[in-house]
Amino acid sequence: LGIDGAAESDRAVQRALGRFRPGVGALFRDAEYESGKRAIDRVLAERGYFDAAQDRHRVRVSRADARADIDLHWSSGARYGLGQAHFEGSPLRAELLDALVPWTPGTPYTQTQLVELQRTLTGLDYFSAIRLQPQPEQARDGNVPVHVLLVPARRNVFSAGVSMGTDSGAGVRLGAERRWLNARGHKARTELDWAQRKRSFAVQYKIPAFARFAGWYTFNANVREEEFADFDTRTLEGAANRSARFGEWGVTAGLWLQRESFSVLAAPRRVSTVWYPELTAQTLRARDPINPHRGWSLNAQLRGNTGSLGSDVGFVQAHVLGKWIAPLGSDTRVLLRGEFGATRSSRLTSLPPSLRFFAGGDQSIRGYGYNTLGDRSGGAAQGGKQLAVGSVELDHYFSRHWGAAAFVDAGDAFNEPGNFTPVLGAGIGLRWRSPAGPIRFDIAHGFSNPDESWRIHIRFGPDL
């Protein structure tokens, strides 16, 4: 088994040769032999050896010795490079898409570069169909041009739906999006989310920033009302940020301006105006991000200001949320979740409730009401500067769509490390695996005091 030419020193090709089956001493099976040849041919094509050919492919069979001698040899020829990408069918300026091409002409050919471009174009949602076709027969100076055929997606998208969650109550959602406003690829989107205890209206405008660190300039304006625990909040906020991708990580840097009116129990309403820069980094690693059998995700935020230039309070805050899923057999998984936060501020009561840490609810500690856990004052949960919450869950699917789960959640929101007294919640649940992610129906009990009762928690969305 061997190969001559440029591929002789290509490690990826040599690894493919090493994986060839059947190996020495193994039973000879014709289907396995043909599959092994095709695997090497495929790697050669994926690595740009378009002139590769098998110059020897023989099997000598000796029935008397019960023996099959394999003689396989390739001549790879030269390795081609990647050439220009030519886009057809796009309603956008050519230079906008040219900036997304992850290679420069002359880069050694690899199929992974084409896959990366396909994934990037898919994520833009400008197009309903994308076809990348390398054209080695039109190669010039050893570089293969790539023809990219694009079919524009529907330009205007309208959405309507109903929602149900024990944190927010029953509600409706209405949305409208213009996928591209002009040939420069600008986008606009509005969304109304009206539920019993959470209401919001958001407007978003996005401008492509593909030339360097491909991402977006995004401008947001939001109005929110929320009722939880002992708080009633009304928030007006605006933001401008820049997002980018670095490998598997998405990073966003932005500036937020927030004016929040809030009341606690029957106390008079207070108003707090805060601006702050924010840096967010996130990643998700899973083959199937909607219904993963194995994977993990991490989201980290850092924000704060000095309490000057019109901000009513100064603070610095870090927040990290991590999730991990591992299989225990084909139908059973263990799900771990950890959430940690820390705030440095001399005046917690001046900090808007949306910037304080609370615990309790569907996505925190089940068995307790939404945002009911935190340092208490005057009979009300005031939230806290610190947060530490963890969860362990075991689920088992007894059919393709239906499963059951058991879980334990623990943690608290608190002000000082010495005041950390974690509370415990545990329960069981039912799972239905839908195309858009699992729907969870949980029954949980809190154990912080003997008067706690059972609570129902309903949540919809991907595990990671």
Image (spheres, grey):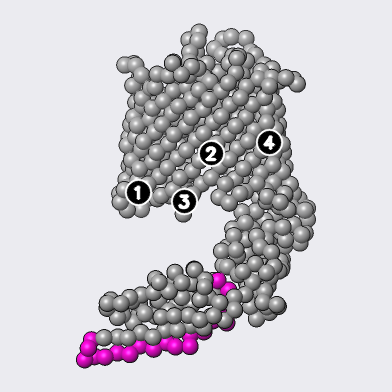
424 and 141: which is toward the camera: 141
Q: CA distance from mark 3 to mark 4?
A: 27 Å
Quarter-of-image position of residue 220: top right
- Which residue is labeled 1 in the image? 327
- Which residue is labeled 3 in the image? 286
Q: CA distance from mark 1 to mark 2?
A: 22 Å
Check if mark 3's residue and mark 1's residue have beta carbons within 8 Å: no
Identity, as a three-letter code, of the amino acid under mark 3:
Ala
128 and 84: which is toward the camera: 84
* Residue 432 shows in the view: no
Q: Residue at x 53, y 20 (%)?
A: 385
Neighbour tally class for label 1: few under 14, some 14-19, many 20 plus, Cα within 10 Å: some
Q: CA distance from mark 1 to mark 4?
A: 37 Å
- Which residue is labeled 2 in the image? 299
Residue 109 placed where, x, y %?
Answer: 60, 70
- Which residue is labeled 4 in the image? 254
Q: Earlier in the sequence, mark 1 or mark 2?
A: 2
Identity, as a three-letter code, of the amino acid under mark 1:
Pro
Residue 100 placed where, x, y %?
Answer: 68, 58
Neighbour tally class for label 4: few under 14, some 14-19, many 20 plus, Cα within 10 Å: some
